[in-house]
């Protein structure tokens, strides 16, 4: 994935790095997650450059950001239309787009990657950008399932590399998981925590463990529900009702699976299963595999565990 167009060798000295106040942010990936992160960062006064290889995706992302912010203004500035218009204009002025990450990162404090969940693609991206970014620049991945340590291994800035796992939709979900590897410096970790706070998010700290906190607890819970269904212990409808009414959850595990996407769940679980083949928690599910093979991914395809057409 050619996010950079030229290479400039730059010496990196971790001893020169100090606590970074993040003002300029580069977000790689113009999809829903990347655009959501860009919207929140721009709304909180950060200068944001959203990068993608596809200019049409970037134009669509900017249009979506503006539309979302107009809805925010309508709701939060109902009695102060002039203040709302000023907020909108300032936020949009903070957003720029580019198809050349290599040039953009030379003037950025933080790079947040939100591209496809593929280890090699992420490593190639960061490996290239590492040669171009200034010594103080922090790299962070928004991965939900891959090892931050593995992604960072393609760079020479292990101390300036961490995880920032946002949740979808980013402007609405308040949580950010901030992940430190064994090599992440305290200065870098503090900078990422402070950045999350500046975005108005609640951050939780986590080591670089599979799935971090939320997904490590959530996906095995969902898979346990699926295995109950496979064994005939209960119908998917009854299991969903039981968890909603018995635990006060807004959605049952099967409803939530369809919302998250069965293909996404399978991708994450496949990775964990391959890395931990003897752990029954990550064992394969025949029902899940069958639905994904049939292209039934959940709400986004109109059918998963339930039908939505």
Image (spheres, grey):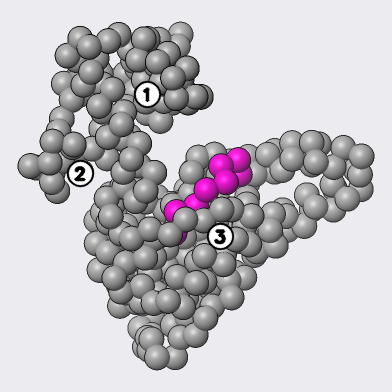
Q: Position of residue 257 (x, y in %)?
A: 37, 25
CA gap between label 1 and label 2 equals 19 Å
CA gap between label 3 and label 1 equals 29 Å
Dot 1 or dot 2, earlier in sequence:
1
Q: Nearer the viewer, residue 185 or 156?
A: 185
For the question of whether residue 234 can be seen, the reply is yes
Dot 3 or dot 1, earlier in sequence:
3
Residue 34 is tagged as none
Q: Position of residue 182 (x, y in %)?
A: 29, 70
Which residue shows up at 68% across the image and 39% down it? 68
Mark 3 closeness class: few <14, some 14–19, many ≥20 residues within 10 Å: many
Task: State which mark lies toward you, 1 or 2.
Answer: 1
Q: Residue furthest left?
A: 278
Which segment did they paint magenta? 171-178
Q: Provide the residue designation for mark 2.
A: 272
Which residue shows up at 56% across the image and 60% down it? 196
**Residue 28 on the magenta segment:** no
For the question of whether residue 117 can be seen, the reply is no
Q: How many marks?
A: 3
Which residue shows up at 25% across the image and 27% down it? 224
75 vs 128: above or below:
above
The answer to which image quadrant residue 139 occupies is bottom left
62 vs 129: above or below:
above
Which residue shows up at 37% across the image and 9% down it? 237
Q: What element does badge 2 sit on?
A: helix
Q: What element does badge 1 sit on?
A: helix
Q: Provide the residue designation for mark 1.
A: 253
Q: Provide the residue designation for mark 3.
A: 196
């Amino acid at each position: 994935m050619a996010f950079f167009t030229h290479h400039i060798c730059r010496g990196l000295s971790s001893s020169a790095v100090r606590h970074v106040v993040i003002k300029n942010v580069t977000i790689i990936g113009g999809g829903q997650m990347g655009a959501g992160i860009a919207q929140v960062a721009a709304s909180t006064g950060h200068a944001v450059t959203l990068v993608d290889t596809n200019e049409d995706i970037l134009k669509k992302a900017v249009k979506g950001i503006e539309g979302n912010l107009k809805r925010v203004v309508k709701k939060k500035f109902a009695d102060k239309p002039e203040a709302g218009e000023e907020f909108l204009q300032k936020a949009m002025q903070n957003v720029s787009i580019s198809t050349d990450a290599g040039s953009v990162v030379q003037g950025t404090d933080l790079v947040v990657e939100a591209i496809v969940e593929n280890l090699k693609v992420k490593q190639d991206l960061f490996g290239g950008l590492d040669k171009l970014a200034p010594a103080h620049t922090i790299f962070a991945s928004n991965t939900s399932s891959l090892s931050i340590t593995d992604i960072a291994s393609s760079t020479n800035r292990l101390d300036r590399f961490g995880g920032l796992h946002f949740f979808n939709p980013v402007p609405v979900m308040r949580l950010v998981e901030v992940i430190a590897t064994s090599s992440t410096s305290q200065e870098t970790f503090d900078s990422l925590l402070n950045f999350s706070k500046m975005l108005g998010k609640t951050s939780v700290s986590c080591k670089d463990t599979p799935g971090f906190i939320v997904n490590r607890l959530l996906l095995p819970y969902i898979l346990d529900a699926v295995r109950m269904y496979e064994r005939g212990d209960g119908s998917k409808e009854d299991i969903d009702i039981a968890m909603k009414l018995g635990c006060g959850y807004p959605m049952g595990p099967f409803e939530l699976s369809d919302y998250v996407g069965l293909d996404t769940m399978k991708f994450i679980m496949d990775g964990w299963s391959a890395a931990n083949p003897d752990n029954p928690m990550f064992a394969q599910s025949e029902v899940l595999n069958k639905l994904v093979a049939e292209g039934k991914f959940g709400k986004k395809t109109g059918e998963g565990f339930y039908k939505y057409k």
